[in-house]
Image: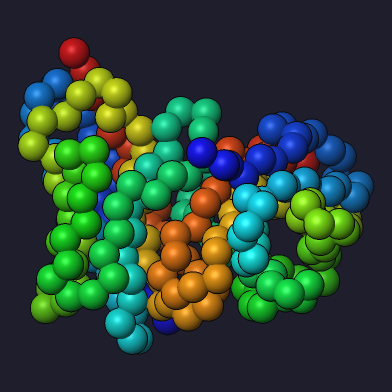
Amino acid sequence: GNSVTQMEGPVTLSEEAFLTINCTYTATGYPSLFWYVQYPGEGLQLLLKATKADDKGSNKGFEATYRKETTSFHLEKGSVQVSDSAVYFCALSEGGGYQKVTFGIGTKLQVIP
Amino acid sequence: EPEVTQTPSHQVTQMGQEVILRCVPISNHLYFYWYRQILGQKVEFLVSFYNNEISEKSEIFDDQFSVERPDGSNFTLKIRSTKLEDSAMYFCASSVQYSNSPLHFGNGTRLTVT
């Protein structure tokens, strides 16, 4: 079956530090890959996505590249802000008309001033 | 921007009681979902719903669970006889009808079974 493995947190960084959150996946087909973010007290929001190999998803300064050869989708940001403090979920979907999404466990990021 | 709304935000119930969690998906979306997250664990798929019937359900979604779209706007999850292990955050989501469209999630309902 499908699975997503991501680094467990919490990750604590100083403002303006470089962020990497690792994510690897196992899937039977050619999934779409996502990063969702959950800010305190809120629901899950789509941060970025990539639907095929070598695609790069980007949003709000975050980037992730779909690497089929390493089955990875690592999240990066060059300079984090306090407002980036949240839980980040790597996820995949096999596509089709509906989206059964498989999530990773989530990585809590705390950015300190 | 339109959003998925869930009520209540927190529900406390006694073991064995029935609970109904409510969701209002985004109005032009056609696929609806329930996910749950037990504290400290992964977000898990429960069920997807399309055209007034279940499209797929996980092994978690046993006979104690049911979903319904009672009118044109609400989407509900019913747990018939709650157990302690049903305590979790339950997320409703919806999506439009095309491949690879992202899910839009609500803020969740925290269910506590005592």
What percent of the width, then of the height, locates residue B65?
79, 64
Q: Is residue A53 left or right of residue B98?
A: left
Q: Position of residue A113 (x, y in %)?
A: 18, 13
Q: Residue extending furthest bottom?
A: A29
**Is residue B79 shown to the viewer in this render?**
no
Q: In the image, what residue occupies the spot 49% across and 73% down?
A: B98
In-image side of B37 versus A66 (left or right): right
Determine whether B83 is above or below A2 in the image: above
The residue nearer to you, when weighing B71 against B49, is B71
Where residue B42 appears, as percent x and y from the top left, is 47, 54
Image location of residue A91, percent across then percent down:
37, 61
Classify B22 as above or below B31: above
Taking the spot 47% from the left edge, 80% from the top edge, the residue there is: A96
Task: Choose top left, top right, bottom left or bottom right for residue A24.
Answer: bottom left
Q: Quadrant of the C terminus of chain B?
A: top right
- For the point 23% across and 38% down, the residue is A60
Question: Is A10 or A69 nearer to us in this picture?
Answer: A69
At 41% from the left and 70% from the top, the residue drawn is B100
Left or right of residue A101, residue A50 in this image: left
Q: Is residue A14 visible?
A: yes
Q: Relative to residue A24, is residue B26 depicted above or below?
A: above
Return the residue found at the far top.
Answer: A113
The colour scheme used here is rainbow
